[in-house]
Image (spheres, rainbow, N blue to C red):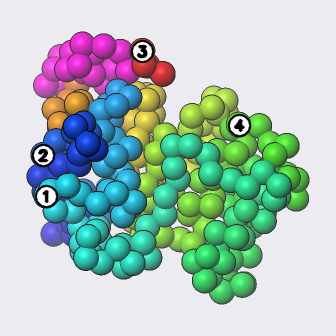
Amino acid sequence: MNETAIVIDKLTKKFEDVTAVDGLSLEVEKGELFGLLGPNGAGKTTTINVLCCIFEPTSGSVSVGGYDVRREPENVKELIGVCPQDTAVFSYLTGRENIELFGNLHTMPKEKLKKNTDELLERMGLSEDAKRRVGKYSGGMRRRINLIMALVHDPEIAFLDEPTVGMDPQSRRAVWDFIKDLKKQNKTVILTTHFMEEAEELCDRVGIIDYGKLIALGAPEQLKAKFGAKNLEEVFIQLTGRRIREEL
């Protein structure tokens, strides 16, 4: 029997008179690679921020790794790694220094931090650039460093909010392979993306949300069959009436 990693029950999040998430309910199993899809403003990032204990729910309940995000945020934060939508790096530090800073914030043992950093830099093709200041990096290189920073402490649950934005096709494929390896390690991954081919390639299941509500849920192949579509973008257009990238 599969273990549940994340439980969202009737989550609502309001900002003044705007309802960003509206009665959202879903469960994500341990070891699942789950895609949270939707247009800009649909509530994806707000949902991620609640799961990461950045925002408190207005109503409803949310548990991550068995811990309530309201009552036990410190326990939740020990389990998770977060690659945010907006690149969060220190431009005046080198790539390695950025990674080590986050590893130290997680109080990682020195030897483990060095081992993990070396392995992740190699996987992301950044070993030769690790001693350069991040301010000299391209946008795609910054995104890759951001991903390493999120995962250097080997979290059980990873939240990847549009991790391949700004990457060239070769870099994107390398990140896809890396994310697939996380699943092989039985990590739970929540992925948001505007690239429908990315969701089809990587995700066990996807949930499509619009105006803060869940409007479709299932494996990519199931959703394509249900809506008579050739790909997920066609499913998305049928459900929302617009293309996923129109608002980028």
Q: CA distance from mark 2 to mark 4?
A: 36 Å
Q: CA distance from mark 3 to mark 4?
A: 22 Å
Q: CA distance from mark 1 to mark 4?
A: 37 Å
For marks 1 and 4 on the same chain, the one whose residue lies earlier in the sequence: 1
Determine which residue is flagged by label 4: 139
For marks 3 and 1 on the same chain, the one whose residue lies earlier in the sequence: 1
Q: Are marks 2 and 3 in contact (CB under 8 Å)?
A: no
- Residue drawn at point x = 73 percent, y = 55 percent: 90
Q: Is residue 199 above or below residue 62?
A: above
Residue 204 appears anywhere in the view: no
Determine which residue is flagged by label 3: 246
Residue 194 appears anywhere in the view: yes
- Residue drawn at point x = 73 percent, y = 62 percent: 98
Q: Is residue 175 above or below residue 244?
A: below
For marks 2 and 4 on the same chain, the one whose residue lies earlier in the sequence: 2
Q: Residue 149 placed where, x, y %?
A: 62, 61
- Residue drawn at point x = 77 percent, y = 37 percent: 138
For marks 2 and 1 on the same chain, the one whose residue lies earlier in the sequence: 2
**Residue kind at label 1, given as amino acid type:** Gly
Please state which of the two labelled residues, at mark 1 or mark 4, is closer to the viewer.
Answer: 1
For marks 3 and 4 on the same chain, the one whose residue lies earlier in the sequence: 4
Q: Residue 112 placed where, x, y %?
A: 67, 81
**Residue kind at label 2, given as amino acid type:** Gly
| Secondary structure of the residue carrying numbered label 2 | strand
Q: Are marks 2 and 4 in contact (CB under 8 Å)?
A: no
Q: CA distance from mark 2 to mark 3?
A: 26 Å
Determine which residue is flagged by label 2: 23
| Secondary structure of the residue carrying numbered label 1 | strand
* Magenta-colored stretch includes residue 231: yes
Q: Are marks 2 and 1 in contact (CB under 8 Å)?
A: yes
